[in-house]
Amino acid sequence: MHGVPPHMRHLIAVSLLGLGLATSPLHAEPARPVPSVRIKAPRVVPPTRAAVLVDYQRVGRELMQLERLRGHRRCAELWPQFKAIQIDAAVKTSDSRVETLEELTELRDRIARLRGIEVSAECLANPLAAACH
């Protein structure tokens, strides 16, 4: 029933049931049990020390750019979280690198939300313009 509006599907199903062309859900055979499949969680490869340091620098730079773009008030709550990362301890062990990378990813997401989007005048005038994709 692809392409049929949702409010019409019920009417079609009732009609098919009345004509005997469809089986009633009440008289349907019970579903066969699906065999359980064990899915192994992917092994997390800890990031390298260099990767965490580069990410730390990039998040710091993005935070400074956000402050210039939106003002100190918009990103004031992010600075303490960023400064709380003690980078020497953060890159010491593989577990600390994974935790730090997760925290940096969270910070990057929050920065992106605060940054927002910018729409050029060309795209406002013509959303189908080539530069607006």
Image (spheres, rainbow, N blue to C red):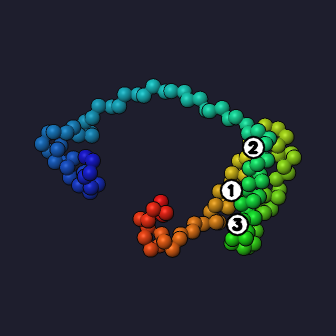
Please tell me the numbered disc located at residue 51. Answer: 2
**How many other residues sit within 10 Å of disc 3, few (<14), some (14-19) or many (≥20)?**
some
Local secondary structure at mark 3: helix
Of all residues shown, which one is farthest toward the front? 130
Of all residues shown, which one is farthest toward the right? 88
**Relative height, residue 120 to residue 26 (above, below):** below
Q: Residue 108, can we see it?
A: yes
According to the image, label 1 marks what residue?
A: 108
The kind of residue on which mark 1 rests is Arg
User: Whole-percent x and y of residue 123?
Assistant: 48, 69
Q: Within the image, what quadrant is residue 18 found in?
A: top left
Q: CA distance from mark 3 to mark 1?
A: 11 Å
According to the image, label 3 marks what residue?
A: 66
Residue that appears at 53% across and 71% down: 120
**Relative height, residue 35 to residue 126 (above, below):** above
Q: Residue 95, can we see it?
A: no
User: Whole-percent x and y of residue 66?
Assistant: 70, 66
Local secondary structure at mark 1: helix
